[in-house]
Amino acid sequence: MHDSTDKRTPLVIAAEINAINQESRRMLLKNAIEVGRRLKEAKELLNHGEWMKWLKESVSYSKSTAANLMNLYEEYGHLLLNPSDNDSNFQALGNLTYTQAILLLGLPEEERGEFVTRNDLDTMTTRQLNQAVKELKTPVPAKEQPQSEHETETGAEAGAGAMAESQTQGDIQIKYVSRTVRPRQQSITKTEPAPAASSLVTSYEEKCTACCQTIANTFQELLTALGHLARLDPRTKEKCSQDADQLASYMVDRLKDWPPVAGTNMKGVQTYSTCEWGG
């Protein structure tokens, strides 16, 4: 009979599994960097206009996936393909997973090592890490200067909408910037709108802003999922991309003519279903 100290315990097994998973994640990042290096090499050899066709037919990559892989090589290749224990950056970044490396592309190179040192990435979820990176990227607001009412309105309108920041696979980081909601002043008519109507306008405008923010956040999650699929099963990824593209096109077309308007003969109203799209 073996001594009790030789027995394998759930704690020991868990430690082994975690070590294997960590090594697998490191290898995934290293392999992604190697792929990025070869993609960059191939792009330089191809003639102008052949890149997209070669990606699709030869390696089943989308343009964005290829760009992410090449970005990984350009930003981390010199560090992780030729590791040195004496390099402080390697000590900080050498254990990154693929997803962590992608998200950290949102920071300048000189800030990544310090960020990893100050934060326990292994205990952070992808959402938490993404939020921490975005907070560091947000510039400190400058001291506000007095503005005229016209300038304030113009600035608010210009800031409204969804801004896509090309980064990682995140490829793309989406940030929805909502404008300040304020009741529109009636300068033409003498009669002010009823308080109840004004309140409804504000309420629905805020609702639209919240919905746009939700769409932007969900789109980022979609991009992350597609990025993982691109590595695991490119064919499934392409199918999901096509489904998402179909839905996006449907949404754009629907927004152009929504809400339904009365027909020109005024005998009826043209109606639409909001649930026509299907995968």
Image: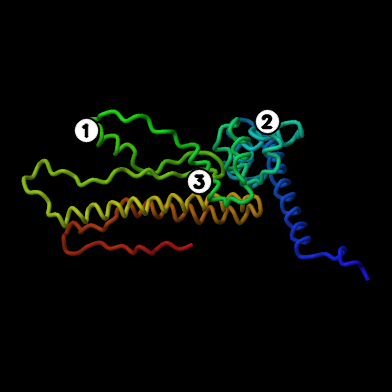
Which residue appears at 41% of the width and 53% of the height? 214
- Label pair 2/1, CB-CB below 8 angstroms: no
Q: Secondary structure at mark 2?
A: helix
Looking at numbered disc 2 in the image, what kind of residue is underneath it? Answer: Leu
* Residue 225 at x, y percent in the picture: 57, 53
187 or 94: which is nearer to us? Answer: 94
| Earlier-in-chain disc, 3 versus 2 | 2
Q: Secondary structure at mark 1?
A: helix
Q: Secondary structure at mark 3?
A: helix
Task: Indicate the quadrant containing the N terminus: top left, top right, bottom left or bottom right.
Answer: bottom right
Which is more foreground, mark 3 or mark 2? 3
Q: Which mark is residue 150?
A: 1
Looking at numbered disc 3 in the image, what kind of residue is underneath it? Answer: Gln
Q: Which residue is mark 3?
A: 131
Q: How far apart, in angstroms, are the residues tagged by discs 2 and 1?
A: 53 Å
* Residue 248 at x, y percent in the picture: 43, 52
* Residue 171 at x, y percent in the picture: 54, 43
Report the side of 172 relative to 183 (left or right). right
Report the side of 130 relative to 89 (left or right). left
Which residue appears at 14% of the width and 54% of the height? 195
Q: How far apart, in angstroms, are the residues tagged by discs 3 and 2?
A: 38 Å
Q: Which mark is residue 45?
A: 2
Which residue appears at 23% of the width and 45% of the height? 182
| Earlier-in-chain disc, 3 versus 1 | 3
184 or 242: which is nearer to us? Answer: 184
Residue 272 against residue 68 in the figure, above or below: below
Which is more foreground, mark 2 or mark 1? 1
Density class for disc 3 (Cα within 10 Å; few <14, some 14-19, many ≥20) is few
